[in-house]
Amino acid sequence: MAFNTGLSGLRAASVDLDVTGNNIANASTVGFKGSKAQFGDLYASGFLSAGTNPIGDGVRVQDVKQSFGQGNISFTDNGLDMAIAGDGFFILNNGGEIRYSRAGQFGIDKDGFVTNNQNMRVQGYTADEDGNLSGIRGDLQIETDNLAPRRTTNLDSDLNLDSREPVLESRVTQLGQVSVEDLITNGGDEFVISYADGRPNQQVQIPATVSSDGGATTRNITAREIADQLNSIDGVSSSATTGFRFEGDGGGVGSLETVLSDPSFVFELDIDGQNVLSTSGAATKQSLVDAINSSNASSVSAFLVDAVDSNGDPLLDGNGDPIQDIRITDNRGSDLTVSYGISGSLTAYDKVGNLDVFADRSVQDIITTAPNDPSVTSLVASAYDAGELSITNAFNPLDQRTYNHATSTTIYDSLGNSHELTQFFVKNPSPGNGVGVSEWSIYAQIDGELVGGTDISPFTARFDQDGALQSINGDPNGEILIDDWVPKDSNGQPNGADGPPAEGEEVVTPIPEPPTTSAFVVNLGETTQYGAEFGVNDQQQNGYTTGRLSGLDVSDEGVLFARYTNGQSQALGQVALASFNNTNGLSPVGDTSWVETFESGQPIIGAPDTGTLGSIKASSVEESNVDLSAELVNLIIAQRNYQANAKTIETSDAVTQTIINLR
């Protein structure tokens, strides 16, 4: 009996030594799970006769149980190495046999499949050509082909246009110049403005008082006063100047030289009846010009011009040199009077001023009338359709002074060629009375050519009183459709990529897949107009050029992303994980892998980080969960147990020998 008991103990201790030694041997094996021998005692008993004082028959190994506890995670320099943080197993295809493992040392074979060191293929959820993950499980494969280019079909621009920006562009028609002196002399006393859009006519009364006394005309009106009234009318603008040619207007050629030679020469300058300059002793024309320019009237300037005769030919002195006049102008259009002569005998010459009258596109006619004298000919009369439009500071993409803001981004044609799209923003005068609404013009240019019809007419964006976009060309979504773009090469010739839609072909937005033309949409729906600096908050377009595979990344959800040289990334698949109701029921088959058994139950398969499944740590592996210190202690314990059981056998042998020696 004692021999069998000791022998069973030796067997059990030997198994314990084997298990401990195996744990120690695999202390550095990635994904290894340590085991522990579990023992049970033995008792001999017959049928219905267990006895009251049974003596044990020894020990037996009940089970060698593996511990599936989490091992430490360490980082590696292999992008495809993966560790599972939490529950689950990698699913491996071993030539049709499905195995499960925690060892995530993976690479790529010659066919692009993700495999482990034993060429078992990793299972996961495959992706389509556009990187969309499916629910279909299969062998994960890395496509090493170039990424095909994608044409731009949508550009989202999130901008802020500075509401403090001034209006740069002015679109007017110069209808002509009106002499205020002629206007008053001829009896005209009002302007009549008619609008092309059907608005009621506007009348502007000329604030003039005219009286005659012995042929002399008395006036209390300036060109500036009339200009101020015209500028108050919607669609009309006017500027006023007074010009005086001091020699041709002041007594004939040569008279100025005569008076300048006299030491008693006196010159006076009055504006609106107020004296602004009184000087004497100016010996030359240039000294008189300098005196005028140094006067207290900042709006007055003087300069020398060549004198001409009635035919416009230059007048020459006896030496054949040009004779010069002094030209005096007042840009306020004031009542300007100059008086000069010998001290005590001055002659006054005055000018009321001239009006330059302009009209924008809304004005049909501007006519000066004299209601009490139908015979007076209209001094300014020009129909809108006949007038030549004059644009001040007109938009020019080459001149940054003609637009308020601009931003550029790269777009792509169907061949993957890059092109530069630039959006220009020009602030417009506020429509209507300017309350509660603002307006901007938008131009689009690709590679230096205006597109979207903006070479003829720009897009119009309107904003409400809160700075939010109301519409672009009436579209509340803020979308601009560019459907006239012909992709060209550096020489300005079509490069063979898809061009604009055929004439009459309807283009719907968003552009449906797959696109067949170069048409694309610029979405400005998030654009604002606040009193802040112009800024591009975000600008995203969906096109790209061709790219070569440059690297792989793995997310916490086990998604394999391919990185390409064109800056794009695309999902190639997703690692699948499996869990079991009874993990201890799995059967180890070597190579740090297990197979399903009846005791383990069927696998529960899903994506990482879902349900009870753990997450994936990229460029990492899970180390063995063996505690080497504990295993060395267990080794000592197993050795002690082995020696003790051997001592049992030795003692039993000695007792038996004593019995045999009895005689």
Image (tube, rainbow, N blue to C red):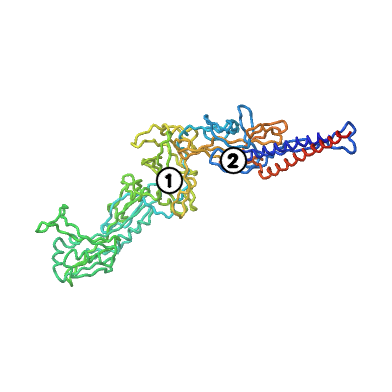
Task: Confirm whether residue 294 shows in the render.
Answer: yes
Structural distance between the alpha carbons of marks 2 and 1: 59 Å
Q: Residue furthest toward the bottom? A: 344
Amino acid type, residue under disc 1 in the picture:
Thr
Residue 178 in the image, given as x and y percentages of width and height: 28, 55
Q: Which residue is mark 1?
A: 460
Q: In the drawing, does residue 362 fall left or right of residue 27?
A: left
Mark 1, secondary structure of its residue: strand
In the rendered view, would you say 573 is above or below 265?
Answer: above
Q: Residue furthest toward the front? A: 663
Q: Which residue is mark 2?
A: 621
Residue 233 in the image, given as x and y percentages of width and height: 38, 55
Q: Nearer the viewer, residue 20 or 604?
A: 20
Task: Confirm whether residue 378 shows in the render.
Answer: no
In the rendered view, would you say 160 is above or below 276?
Answer: above
Q: Residue furthest toward the left? A: 318
Q: Which residue shows up at 41% across the image and 33% down it?
A: 499
Mark 2 neighbour class, 10 Å CA radius: few under 14, some 14 to 19, many 20 or more? many
Q: In the drawing, does residue 64 fall left or right of residue 350?
A: right
The quarter of the rendered structure image containing the N terminus is top right
Of the numbered discs 2 and 1, the one sitting upstream in the chain is 1
Residue 345 in the image, given as x and y percentages of width and height: 17, 70
Q: Which residue shows up at 41% across the image and 45% down it?
A: 408
Mark 2, secondary structure of its residue: strand
Amino acid type, residue under disc 2 in the picture:
Val
Q: Nearer the viewer, residue 199 or 177?
A: 177
The quarter of the rendered structure image containing the C terminus is top right
Q: Nearer the viewer, mark 2 or mark 1?
A: 2
Q: How many marks?
A: 2
In the rendered view, would you say 360 is above or below 116?
Answer: below
Residue 66 in the image, given as x and y percentages of width and height: 70, 38
Q: Nearer the viewer, residue 591 or 120?
A: 591
